[in-house]
Image (cartoon, rainbow, N blue to C red):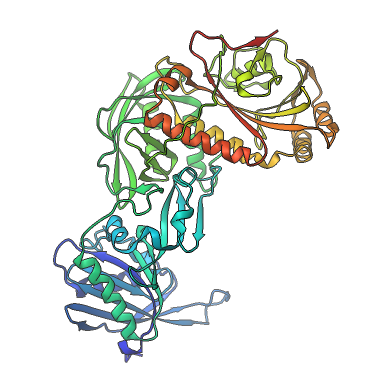
Amino acid sequence: MDGIDKLQIKPFLSILLGSSQAATDAGEIHAAIAEIIEKEGRKDEIVEMHPTKHDDAGESLIYYSHYEVLKNPSWFAGNNLTDVENHIFITFNLNNTFAFYMSEKGMKDEVRTYFFTSRLPDLKVINISHLNYLFINEDKIKMLWLLGIHGRESFKADSKVLGGESVAETLNPLEDQSFTMSAVRTSLEGTETTIGLNPYKSSLWRGPCKDWETFENRVLEIIDKIDKNKDEVENPISILATPVADMKGIQGIYDLSFLEPEFYSHGLSESKIDRLRKIHSDFTYKIMDTLNSPLIKLEVSKYKENIGDIIILPKVNDYEIQFELIEAHPKRGASKELEYFYNVFKYPELIKCWYESGHAIVNSRAFKTEYRDVTYNKFIWADFEDFDILKEKPELDGNVALDKIGCQKSLFCWIKHHWSGLWDAGENFLTTDRPTGWLFCDDGAGEKADFIHIDQHNDKTYISLIHIKAANTNSTDRRISVGAHDIVLNQAIKNLRYINRKKLATDLKERADKAESKYCWKDNITCEHSLFIDAIESIERESKIQFRVIIVQPHTMKSYYTKNAQSNIKKQLDVLLVSAESAIRASGAEFYIIGHDDTSRKSVKIT
């Protein structure tokens, strides 16, 4: 089948775009890609590549190669049957602009991975901002594929697809600003014709072509447009976060967090999960000032003892983030411990960073977000007295000891001694020295909350799902931590499906049956956990039940939060809290978050 002529080709127009910085021989580029197609990742497949043919169309050069792929049928266990697939690979070249067509499924993405490498050293993708300018009109978008930069398993979707006549107008300035565009289908300027574009992959598609002439003309029109117009636009859809191609303008890191291993375990190897667990349990760190740069400087401690400091430089290559260790200064005898800590930066997907410049590093990419001017003014400020805001749960010999709830100074103990449900709004919040109602500790894998509290107030039954997160530091000059709130909010919202009395009782009963022990109190007196479940089941269906989602996060100090009202740090946290409140209230529950009142005012307390 060596006699295939280009006039016999009528493909679905879907092309990979590229460019070279200097004059490059298009024939050599075509041959190098043909070799990749023939030899890379084939396993048991055999590729028979036929001689390449070439042609020209005005100033443009065209190369095309027909090849056959011989492989065993996927459904057949033997080795004496062979399927033969026929495919075509085409290169279009105009000056320094290239378009590649591959009929074989998945081959565009495979070849794309060799851009920027020694196999294709002179070839790079088209800059995203260049493609944005040429092919995206915000008012003409018909389909929009969105990718969340808030992290996997957030209370928001990882991705979503929108369709309509003018999709950009349907975006929510608050809810959608933590998404970035991954692909778009939009009308070409002045026409009803639509094209699809995935700027991350430097990929463009339009649809089936009735003949070669149609296909050729459309491809040449595209590469001619790219070649002759070099204008760029960074953010064609103003509401969405924008991926950045370099570290220019990124400065002033104010928060850094590592994925929570129990919450973000999906898709991670066991070694990464183990490392995350040790990072969270054994190490703490303080972010140091790095002036006007993207550098990450951390003072690291293990078991609260300083073990040294490190300086990390984030780098962007093809929109992917890598972290480079610039300096490490271990304390005497602590080099191995410090090395264990900074080696986590070899895995960019485990790390989130936030910068004063409005940038965030999430999912191994850097983004710029124009944070909306929304204000969250519903913090409850509590005085935690002499309780240890760094200690979440009681411990014995370094291990969690839930049977010690109430015997130590952890935040769990604070809840047991002082939680009150006898208030109906945030401004009426109070604590107590004489707790009433039911208090159930549900801590453990699959928990609905750290604590569940039930009490009667006025004419309502309040069921509070209480989630607790210890502060990252108790330093009096600590700043706001978006990451600290991000983790616990995701955990809380993930369990919103249990905002139902019958569902909650059923699930708690199943969990209690499997647990060795559960801890429960009625009016501050220890009792059997089965009585708590009976109490939930006995609540009359017609009763006025109000669910509450309570977040206890003492890392946020009232003094710092209130005096930094215009900072990007507070704006980003406020966006997160307003979004969380919207998600929680949509389920019918109330939302409250409790920070640390470090001012002279004391919390109201009933006795």
Q: Nearer the viewer, residue 510 or 498?
A: 498
Q: Residue at x 30, y 75 (%)?
A: 219
Q: Looking at the rendering, which quadrant does residue 441 occupy?
A: top right
Q: Residue at x 27, y 61 (%)?
A: 126
**Does residue 555 appear anywhere in the picture?**
yes
Residue 427 pos. (x, y %): 60, 20
Q: Quadrant of the N terminus?
A: bottom left
**Does residue 275 appear anywhere in the picture?**
no
Q: Nearer the viewer, residue 242 or 414?
A: 242
Q: Residue at x 77, y 22 (%)?
A: 458
Q: Looking at the rendering, which quadrant does residue 588 occupy?
A: top right
Q: Residue at x 42, y 44 (%)?
A: 349
Residue 569 pos. (x, y %): 40, 30
Image height check: is 174 above or below 335? below
Image height check: is 223 above or below 493? below
Residue 396 pos. (x, y %): 62, 17
Q: Is residue 198 left or right of residue 448?
A: left
Q: Quadrant of the C terminus?
A: top right
Q: Is residue 375 left or right of residue 405?
A: left
Image height check: is 278 above or below 423? below
Q: Is residue 49 left or right of residue 387?
A: left
Residue 372 pos. (x, y %): 42, 39
Residue, far left: 23
Q: Looking at the rendering, which quadrant does residue 34 occupy?
A: bottom left
